Image (cartoon, rainbow, N blue to C red):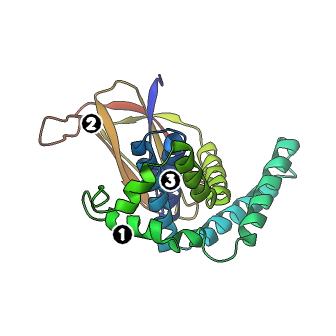
Amino acid sequence: MSTRVLYEQPLNERIRNFLRLEFLFKQAAYYLNRTSEWDSRTTLSCILDISDIFSSTDLKAEVMKELERHCASLTRLEQNPAVDRSQLTNLLNEMDELIDKLHSISGQIAHNLKESEFLTTIQQRSSVPGGTCDFDLPVYHHWLQQPSKYRTNDLADWLRNFDTIAQAIQLILKLIRDSALLKPVTAKSGFFQKNLDPNLPCQLVRVALPAGVPYFAEMSGGRHRFTIRFLHFSTVNSRILQTDQDVNFELACCCI
């Protein structure tokens, strides 16, 4: 079991979308090879959510811009004698390969999923509470009764549309997370605020708390500053209150 709990707060819309997609990709991968119809339902729900995010913004262009920006930054390190040249070369080659693969994808990512009447019907009914139950979607019920290997093959085929961009997002988030170390900080009376340099945009704030503490971190922020409040956890009390104790935690402001 982990000895600490990590909280992350994106400070721009691009990283917010990347984190949501990372969450959905992880959830889909977890349930993909499980055999019950409820596992297949969860996996398909993730796929539809992923597809919905891609339909609302040009994420392919966003990911390519981010990869190209990181490539430019890392290329400037090639002349630094303290840098592991072999590791840097491998990383740059991986990024160039992902950029080329994204360039080769014509049109919108996974546009073929939008052309599937089966998936579109489920997507439309998903907005209704309980709208994907058996009597509402007999076609979905029929698919769920197929042997698990057939359902898994279908789900894997649909997820495969996102393989390249999922790898790119995973790499980008790793670079961002690795750009800053967690350092000890204290929040006086459960509150912490930090001003940021707008010329050095911070993309992600990370907070680490020891596992088992009776409070959690609630963060908000933007380009100029961010705040952290440590709130007492309770599922019983109607109000969640900020602790009045000083809180020792670890903080990383990821700028790259």
Give the answer, above or below, for where 53 lies relative to 37: below
Q: Quote the CA–CA distance across marks 1 and 3.
A: 25 Å
Residue 19 is marked as 3
At which x and y percent is residue 136? 28, 62
Q: Amino acid at mark 3?
A: Leu
To which residue does mark 2 refer? Answer: 189
Q: Amino acid at mark 1?
A: Gln
Say which label, 1 or 3, has the lower sequence index: 3
At which x and y percent is residue 125? 32, 66
To which residue does mark 1 refer? Answer: 124
Look at the image and tell me whether residue 21 can be seen. yes
Give the answer, above or below, for where 190 lies relative to 1: below
Within 10 Å of disc 1 (Cα), the crowding (few <14, some 14-19, many 20+) is few
Q: Amino acid at mark 2?
A: Ser
At which x and y percent is residue 176? 61, 50
Q: Quote the CA–CA distance across marks 1 and 2.
A: 47 Å
Seen from the viewer's position, the closer of residues 169 and 147 is 147
Q: Quote the CA–CA distance across marks 2 and 3.
A: 30 Å
Please report the residue visible at 32 percent of the width from the left and 37 percent of the height from the top.
216
On the rendered structure, is 79 left or right of 47? Answer: right
